[in-house]
Image (tube, coloured by chain):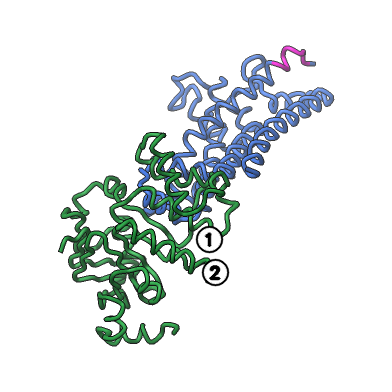
Chain colours: A blue, B green
Amino acid sequence: MLFDSEIFQITFLSLQVSAIATSISLLIGLPFGTWLALGNFRGRSFILSIINTGMALPPVVVGLVVAIMLWRSGPLGNLRLIYTPVAIIIAQTIIAAPVVTGLTAAALEALDPRLQQQLLGLGASRVQMVWLLWREARLPLLAALMAGFGSVISEVGASMMVGGNIRGQTRVLTTAIVLETSKGEFNTALALSALLLVLTYLINLSLTWIQQRGQKR
Amino acid sequence: MNALIELHDLLIRRNGRDALSIDSLGIPRGETLAVVGPNGAGKSTLLLALARLIKPTSGEIIFNGSPLSKLDDLEYRRKISFVFQDPLLLDMTVEQNIALGLKFRNTPGEEIHSRVWKWIKHLGIESLAKRRASQLSGGEAQRVSLARAFVLEPQLLLLDEPFSSLDPPTRTKMLEDLSVLLAQDHRTAVFVTHNLNEAAKLSHRIAVIVGGMLRQVGPARQIKARPADEAVAAFLHELPR
């Protein structure tokens, strides 16, 4: 049985690690996806195919690789990050970054390619051009953000493997649901599931509201 | 000749073939040069090269006496302006669209406002100023696109078939307006079109490009009366009467 304060702590940690992982993914995925969409270089299609594959990365595989890297005897073991929230953030970033990158590239590729030339022809610098292209593609870019967040708030495999589901330290909503189910505490598991669904819904509702407002303008 | 632009031994190869070859061409200050030719002849390639949006394989383009290869691309592009076949407006208001190029140049706010409104009035689009670009008809959008280019008061104006997607009455009206603007403004302009009558109406001289080669340059009457070669004659023959 979980207490209210513990549920609050689990919920807060879930939101915190997923929000940080999504933000880092955005910082990586937005420029990288833009470079892939606007670039014209050898190997571009190959990199895009890797990114697209990465969009379907199984969380348990990511969890396994990150666990091996952060394990005490692993190459990054001296950082002592295994079974910490930071480890979960690292794993979730690896899951969300390809999603944000791939959808960013797709969003910018969907714009009229002559728009770049038009903006440059009006005297835009590269930075000004990219900023306006992001602005034009803001609705699909928001969808990329929602997909990135959705891919990490709901994953369990990686969080379990690198976080260890330690009570009061690395337990998040999804790993708590798995634990309660394994104990036969179905009512608690169902309540936590409902909480996770409501939270995910509320976050996506606000992002969808922003998206639709942009659409109607 | 006091040329703003000179092209020397220009060759542009694209996708493994010669897309454009021009031995020599000068465009004097204040001239409107129309570029005509069949589809795929290399007309748009010429405009893209003049805008430094593609770089020549060999040869040189001289602007104001300086080779483009020696000038900073951004600095050069801020002296010109480009109007494409489609208006390519951004999802913002008409006023904001017209102000774009001035904002790129960090022009002060008050000056942006006065210049934008000067051209909004010139092009008769006052009633559209606060509308979003997505709410405009094709003709209205192209008018905004022209205002967006003219507001920059560029040394060189490049127009790539700006009216080809408009219906005939709108097209005729827009051509008349553009012809007045170019005449009033004495701006150097290069105007790509399929239509020889449009070219004759708007320009001082016409350049005929066929098969990626500049074949003839001269006034419309001379080109019609004495085509330089069979390719030009065949192109003129194909045009609707």
The kind of residue tagged 1 is Gly
Q: Which residue is mark 2?
A: B167
For the point 38% across and 37% down, which residue is it?
B111
Chain at tag 1: B
Residue B51 image point, x, y percent: 31, 56
Q: Classify A70 as above or below B99.
A: above
The dot on residue B139 is: 1
Q: Residue at x 70, y 25 (%)?
A: A173
Q: Position of residue B6 (x, y in %)?
A: 20, 62
Element under label 1? helix
Say whether residue B238 is left or right of residue B62: right
Which residues are drawn in magenta? A2-8
Q: Is residue B107 left or right of residue A48?
A: left
**10 Å crowding of disc 1: few (<14), some (14-19), many (20+):** some
> Closer to the camera, B43 or B115?
B115
Graded by Cα atoms within 10 Å as few (under 14), some (14 to 19) or many (20 or more), the crowding at tag 2 reads few
